[in-house]
């Protein structure tokens, strides 16, 4: 009889009779790819392998599985499996005697090959989060991303000690989040003078990051503690906390979801009621991932994003993650006005009522209103 320790792997060892060896093995591998692509979550190869082995294979291994597409990688893998399995029997006769008989050795070899293939696929297919725009899916022909220049409309004083991590325009004033341990804060700032009108400190060990204002509440991220603070927008009284996975960098909202960056090319949309991830987009400029996405602002249906240590702002389609434009801000702050290497562009705020766009940076002595022009 079939050894009990091989029963969990029997779908991988015994090739179903339907449609022959090559088709059955192809459908099994393609079924695995479908499972891992569907989940798109943080996982280890062993976790995905466990899931595959715990599921029943598709009945009869039909000609095509719903939602699963043959791609070049799977086709190549299929051809490799055909070459390895075409000379082997489709079923194993009863195993008697030593487990080290020629038949058992052949089964063991096939198990080993299967494990290598499955572990390789697991590493290839695992991604974090439920990603709305899956890399590798067919997309329209890539068009050159437009570059925009700027002109300065006005500039105002800005606290040169403020390590700006988040910026929001509201009711004629600026809401600003400043970072660094022991110096983090939430502030209300007078636009015209840069004067701090209201302030609450964020104590150690927290390093404050991005903020956003949604339905009378200010949400503030922290960098590495996976903890956010919620404040009353008028009194700055802390009224709650929330947790999230990964680092906290930039924060904005579209009126429905909190939109969070974490320093990678992933942007997550959180439910503000329970802070569960509604969706994740991966940000790409053409075929290149855009990493180190920092401070965020939602502007006329797009996500504007600072890129850490870059003098430009990315304009991101919130549905696809595609970069739809770059705003080149080189030369905005004159040389010699800052000396700290971390005094970089960071901070975007939008006056929705009057269509004004404000930008500043960490430790910058000025805050600018700019007008964006197509180059």
Image (tube, rainbow, N blue to C red):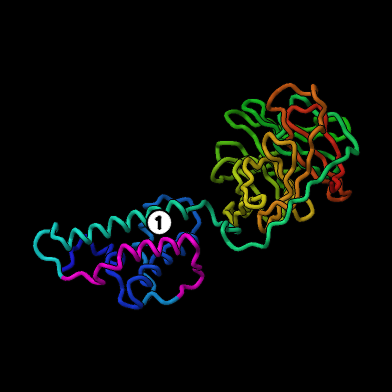
Is 73 within the magenta? yes
Q: Look at mark 1 in the image and give the residue it sits on.
A: 48
Q: Is residue 270 visible?
A: no
Q: Is residue 52 visible?
A: yes
What residue sits 59% from the left and 28% below the top? 204
Residue furthest left as drawn: 97
Which quadrant of the figure has residue 153?
top right
Eyeballing the image, is 286 above or below 335?
A: below
Split into 4 quadrants, where in the image is the N terminus?
bottom left
Q: Position of residue 270 (x, y in %)?
A: 62, 53
Instruction: Give 63 or 253, whichever is nearer the viewer.
Output: 63
Q: Position of residue 10 (x, y in %)?
A: 27, 66
Instruction: Give 103 or 250, whichever is nearer the viewer.
Output: 103
Q: Position of residue 261 (x, y in %)?
A: 63, 45
State the extent of the magenta-drawn residues as a range.
64-93
Q: Position of residue 233 (x, y in %)?
A: 74, 43
Q: Is residue 298 left or right of residue 356?
A: left
Eyeballing the image, is 86 above or below 255?
A: below
Eyeballing the image, is 75 above or below 66?
A: above
């Amino acid at each position: 009889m079939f050894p009990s320790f091989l029963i969990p792997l029997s779908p991988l060892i015994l090739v179903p009779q339907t449609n022959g060896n090559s088709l059955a093995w192809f459908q099994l591998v393609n079924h695995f790819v479908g499972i891992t692509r569907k989940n798109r979550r943080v996982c280890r190869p062993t976790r995905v392998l466990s899931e595959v082995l715990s599921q029943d294979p598709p009945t009869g291994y039909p000609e095509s599985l719903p939602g699963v597409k043959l791609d070049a990688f799977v086709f190549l893998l299929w051809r490799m499996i055909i070459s390895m399995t075409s000379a082997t029997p489709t079923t194993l006769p009863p195993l008697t005697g030593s487990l080290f008989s020629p038949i058992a050795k052949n089964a063991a070899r096939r198990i080993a090959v299967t494990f290598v293939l499955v572990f390789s696929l697991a590493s290839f297919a695992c991604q974090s989060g439920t990603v709305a725009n899956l890399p590798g899916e067919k997309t329209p022909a890539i068009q050159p991303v437009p570059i925009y220049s700027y002109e300065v409309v006005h500039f105002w004083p800005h606290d040169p000690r403020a390590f700006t991590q988040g910026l929001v325009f509201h009711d004629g004033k600026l809401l600003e989040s400043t970072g660094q341990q022991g110096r983090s804060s939430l502030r209300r700032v007078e636009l015209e003078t840069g004067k701090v009108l209201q302030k609450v400190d964020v104590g150690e060990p927290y390093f404050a990051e991005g903020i956003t204002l949604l339905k009378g509440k200010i949400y503030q991220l922290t960098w590495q503690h996976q903890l956010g603070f919620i404040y009353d927008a008028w009194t700055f009284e802390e009224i709650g906390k929330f947790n999230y996975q990964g680092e906290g960098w930039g924060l904005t909202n579209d009126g429905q979801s909190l939109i969070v960056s974490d320093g990678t090319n992933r942007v997550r949309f959180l439910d503000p009621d329970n802070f569960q991830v509604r969706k994740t987009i991966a940000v790409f400029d053409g075929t290149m991932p855009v990493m180190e996405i920092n401070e965020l602002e939602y502007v006329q249906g797009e996500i504007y994003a600072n890129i850490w240590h870059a003098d430009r702002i990315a304009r991101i389609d919130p549905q696809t993650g595609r970069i739809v434009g770059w705003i080149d801000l080189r030369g905005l702050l004159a040389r010699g006005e800052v000396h700290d290497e971390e005094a970089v562009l960071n901070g975007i705020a939008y006056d929705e009522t009057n269509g004004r766009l404000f930008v500043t940076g960490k430790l910058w002595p000025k805050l600018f209103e700019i007008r964006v022009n197509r180059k």
